[in-house]
Amino acid sequence: MSSPSTDDPIILEVPTHDDRIMWDIYLYTNVLPAIAAADELGLFTLLAEAPLTVDEVSARLNLEHDWTEVLLATLGAMKLARVLDGRFQLTDMAREYMLPDSPYYRGLSLQSFAMRNPGERVKHSITTSGTPENERYVVREWKPGDLSREVAERTTTTMHGWSFASAVGMARNADFTGVTRLLDVAGGSGGFAIAIAQPHPQIHCTVADLDVVCELSQEYIDRYGVADRVDTLVMNMFYEKFPRGYDAMLFSCVLHDWGQEQRAQLIASAYEALDSGGRIYIHEMLMNDSGDGPFGPALFGLGMRIGTRGKQFTAPELRRDLEAAGFADVFVQNTFGYFSVVIGSKP
């Protein structure tokens, strides 16, 4: 396009849309590292003891006043703190998710993600799509079962932190009528099996995963006192037949890690193992039917594409995949926050 002539000036008009979203795109890049740093510094634990002024926080954590001020403002903007009578105090949300003694603590997970270089990871993921030799993802080790104890522990701990709240929400809000034995496929820490077993004493749950992960699952199972109703099963979901004798199979945040071929294989394996009347439960953040949002699932889908080459789904996509495998009476229930469960039955 040629440069405008000085004889033909551009007449400016106020944009029809303000630029807040553009600012948000830029400004959000600093939120994760800031919140992770606040957690690592002990700011949340400090505020849990008593409300404090900016000066008091600055002195207690040995931080510059201005840094303390902007860090506390960031917590306030993210609804993790609020000011009352000149003192910052934690919100109930922060107490649930940002204190180490909470079962839903996210701090370590946030710190882990904050250590990555998101810009480089996004660019690398997009530009190396379709070149498996350049892909270095945990799921590549997960499929053949080549996980080291270190990788398994790091991944399981991180995923437990992110999933346990939604697990408890699903256990309370999904329809488990008639279910007595549930197989939690690739169940990781066992968080979903634990969450289901506590309010549903009639359901016996089995966490199926790789041997090194099952060792970690047992620690969580013992911690929450459900060893009489939750056990583990060493199983590679891609290379072994799913066991029979279960009337429900759960995939929670599992299918989003894989491509269409692998997803179809897992759904078919569940269908084959279930008897007539058995149910499949797929717990995911669902995109809206048009595929253009909402915010959480769309950005989670971006994260899955970067991290695993997977994606998030719409409800019609999952309905199509379940019906293609033979499942019927497919329906959706919102369970907690962004999450929903898609349930289908074997005729």
Image (tube, rainbow, N blue to C red):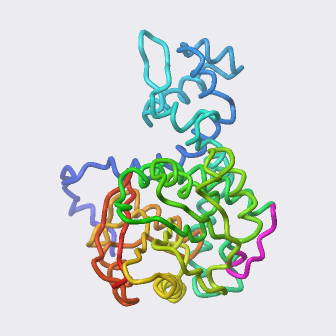
Query: The magenta stretch spans which residues?
Result: 140-149
Which image quadrant is residue 293 in?
bottom left
**What secondary structure characterizes most of the magenta part?**
loop
Residue at 22% from the left image edge and 62% from the top image edge: 7
Report the quarter where the N terminus lies. bottom left
Residue at 49% from the left image edge and 59% from the top image edge: 203
Q: How many marks?
A: 0
Q: Nearer the viewer, residue 109 or 169?
A: 169
Judge whether 332 appears above or below 104 on screen.
below
Looking at the image, which residue sits at the far top? 85
Residue at 40% from the left image edge and 48% from the top image edge: 24
For residue 334, side relative to residue 199 (left or right): left
Magenta region includes residue 143? yes
Residue at 56% from the left image edge and 53% from the top image edge: 194
How far from the left and from the top, in percent, is residue 233? 67, 70
Magenta region includes residue 181? no
Judge whether 86 appears above or below 340 on screen.
above
How far from the left and from the top, in percent, is residue 339? 39, 58
How far from the left and from the top, in percent, is residue 105? 59, 41
Q: Nearer the viewer, residue 218 or 124?
A: 218
Which image quadrant is residue 289 in?
bottom left
Report the quarter where the C terminus lies. bottom left
How far from the left and from the top, in percent, is residue 110? 61, 47
For residue 51, side relative to residue 19 (left or right): right
Q: Nearer the viewer, residue 11 or 84?
A: 84
